[in-house]
Amino acid sequence: MIQLVFMLEEPSAKIVLESLLPRILPSDVSFICIPHEGKQDLEKSLPVKLKNWNVPNSWFVVIRDKDQGDCIEIKARLRNLCEDCHRPETLIRIAVHELESWFLGDLAAVSVAFDKPGLAGRQNSKKFRNPDALANAQEELKKLIKGYQKMAGARRIAPHLNLDSNTSVSFSHLLSGLHAYLEQIQAS
């Protein structure tokens, strides 16, 4: 059996993936999500985990927010860390700008999660057509949902995310990347 090990920047990403992955991974693929307390913690922990992981048939996926950084530089730095640890095949995905962009890419899911029927119709507005362009997705969610909290919001929204119609490009790249990665693993 293949095991995917998700190295995550934050605990809310674990909540989202534990809801999404059973819906998208084949039954012969298991997964484990390892959250960290921010990007520095993730990048410090990554070499240790990659070098010392000894569970056979394990493959790594690293997910980190872009925040205000340069996506290409972040990905290159993470790629170098993985290569230095003899794990060049590691899949690296960047949430642009942050995990909440994925939620703004599916306002219908946010609408259902918080019983706010009017939100879904706002998906086609200029602001939410390309949620990855919003540098402050979490703040935008707080404007839409009074009292929005990161962890509780992830728990409520994740089960409703539509895998086929999310307008976040980085969310689509995660899904397509996982699909291609699994094909690569199975072919090796």
Image (cartoon, rainbow, N blue to C red):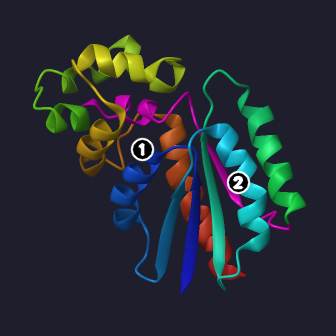
Up-down relation of residue 139 to residue 187 (above or below): above
In which quadrant is the N terminus drawn? bottom right
Horizontal and vertical percent for residue 12? Answer: 42, 44
Q: Amino acid at mark 2?
A: Ser
In which quadrant is the C terminus drawn? bottom right
Q: Is residue 130 visible?
A: no
Magenta stretch, residue numbers: 86-107
- Given residues 12 and 104, the one toward you in this image is 12
Q: Residue at x 19, y 22 (%)?
A: 119
What crowding class fits label 1: few (fewer than 14 Cα within 10 Å), some (14-19), or many (20 or more)? many
Helix, strand or loop under label 1: helix
Up-down relation of residue 102 to residue 56 (above or below): above
Helix, strand or loop under label 2: helix
113 horizontally vs 177: left or right = left
**Which residue, given by chain and number where applicable, does mark 1 sit on?**
12
Mark nearest the camera among 1 and 2 is 2
Q: Residue at x 56, y 77 (%)?
A: 3
What crowding class fits label 2: few (fewer than 14 Cα within 10 Å), some (14-19), or many (20 or more)? few
Q: Amino acid at mark 1?
A: Ser
Q: Is residue 182 visible?
A: yes
Of the numbered discs 1 and 2, the one sitting upstream in the chain is: 1
Q: Quadrant of residue 90?
A: bottom right
Horizontal and vertical percent for residue 80? Answer: 86, 50
Horizontal and vertical percent for residue 183? Answer: 61, 72
**Which residue, given by chain and number where applicable, does mark 2 sit on?**
45
Q: Residue at x 83, y 52 (%)?
A: 81
- Given residues 30 and 146, the one toward you in this image is 146
Distance Cα–Cα, label 1 vs label 2: 18 Å
Up-down relation of residue 55 to residue 49 (above or below): below
